[in-house]
Image (tube, rainbow, N blue to C red):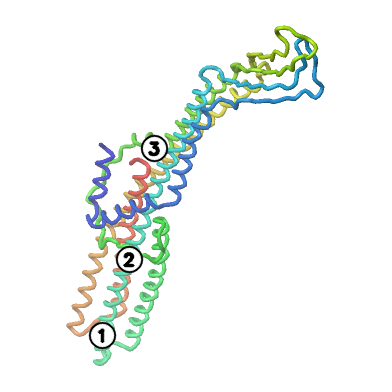
Amino acid sequence: MKRAIIVIIVLLVYDVSGAQELDRLIAEGLSNNPEIQQFEMQYRIASEKVNEVSTIPNTEFGVGYFVSEPETRTGAQRFKVSAKQMLPWFGQLTAREHYVTALAEARYEDIVIAKRKLVASISQSYYYLYENKSKQEVLTENIALLKTYETLALTSVEVDQASAVDVLRLQMRQNELEQLKQVLMQQYLAEQTLLNKLLSRDKDIAVTIIQELQMPSEDFDVDTDQLTLHPELIKYDKLYQSIEQSELLNRKDRSPMFGFGLDYINVEKRPDLTFSDNGKDIVMPMLSVSIPIFNKKYRSVTKQNALEQHKINYQKQDRLNRLETLLDKALKARISARISHTTATKNLKQAKDAEDILLSRYETGGIDFNDVLDIQELQLKFQLNQIEAIKAYYVQTSIINYVIQ
């Protein structure tokens, strides 16, 4: 229930159409991504191994022909046919099935982990595209604004209230912004290729990006207890359980195996004698037992299993530490993004007020275009800071969702 609430809150922090588009991209990625399909195939292979290990040993058949026929009282032996079947000790096959099943369950967590990572990667790529697209729009607006300033400067030059240098500086500034816009367009195409390949589709397919993302009014609460349910940690639990099943199997392997068989020997009749058992074939049922007398191997496996369990515990603790660090960094970075956005919004308002003051001077006959360029540069800086802060907020949210969702 808590997970569902978190997801709903996250979806409400931006436009519904944008949320639907991102959800559609994620669903497409989960269906088509080859890495996910690879892990699913590995899980299916591991699951199928249960059928492999649940079979009894092969039945042994033998045929022999006596080159030198031994003579017996009832006749000469011609050939021998034998069959033998070994059977595992009671519960050995079940223990083997449980072990392989435990390994398959650990493989399943690889699928869950890969899906979480893919969702985070698609979301982050989407937000990077949003950042790039928004910056291009801001640059377009600023280039248009500079063209307006250029027109004012040309008018001022005609009445000797500005110099041609002011016009050239405004034009050079436009060139700089146009260059930055062209660079952003190439970066956008590269990021779009990345996103399309995450979805396993053609790199040139256009991605629909939300028009505007808003900074949420408040952050949703994060339940750090959910961290213990992360699939990366659950995988270690299942690996630990597989080692337990391995030890149970090792104990079963120490048990003896027993088998049963049948020997049939063909006997030829003696032509020189007449009696009741003349030429009577031999049928001999057999029972065999295989006992692991030299069991040093099994003691070694027990020690290895114990060491493997200690290793898994250390790996799980190390991964837990890393996830806690990742979560804490994401939470702090999200707070920093909100602070940056608030500051940029405040500064942008003040820069616009300064711009209004400068433009009001134009009506009275005096304007300093150096100040105009400085204010325009500040405005652009604060607008870009706003966009970067919003992108950072949502990227960090995707990381938080990866850790605790």
Q: Measure how far apart labels 1 and 2 are at the Cα level.
A: 28 Å
Residue on which the image places disc 3: 230
Q: Position of residue 373 (x, y in %)?
A: 31, 76
Q: Nearer the viewer, mark 1 or mark 2?
A: 2
Tell whether label 1 touches label 3 (CB within 8 Å): no
Which image quarter: residue 88?
A: top right
Secondary structure of residue under mark 3: loop
As shown in the figure, which amino acid type bears the numbered disc 2? Answer: Lys
Q: Position of residue 348 (x, y in %)?
A: 26, 65
Mark closest to the chain's N terminus, 1 or 2: 2
Relative side of 227 to 217, left or right: right
Q: In the image, what residue occupies the spot 43% across and 38% down?
A: 108
Q: Measure how far apart labels 3 and 1 are at the Cα level.
A: 60 Å
Tell whether label 2 touches label 1 (CB within 8 Å): no
* Number of residues whose C-alpha sits closer than 10 Å to that of mark 1, classed few (under 14), some (14–19) or many (20 or more): some
Residue on which the image places disc 1: 151
Secondary structure of residue under mark 2: helix
The numbered mark at residue 202 is none
* Number of residues whose C-alpha sits closer than 10 Å to that of mark 3, classed few (under 14), some (14–19) or many (20 or more): many
Q: Position of residue 28 (x, y in %)?
A: 35, 53
Mark closest to the chain's N terminus, 3 or 1: 1
Quarter placement of the C terminus: top left
Q: In the image, what residue occupies the spot 75% across and 8% down?
A: 274
The numbered mark at residue 133 is 2
As shown in the figure, which amino acid type bears the numbered disc 1? Answer: Thr
Mark closest to the chain's N terminus, 3 or 2: 2
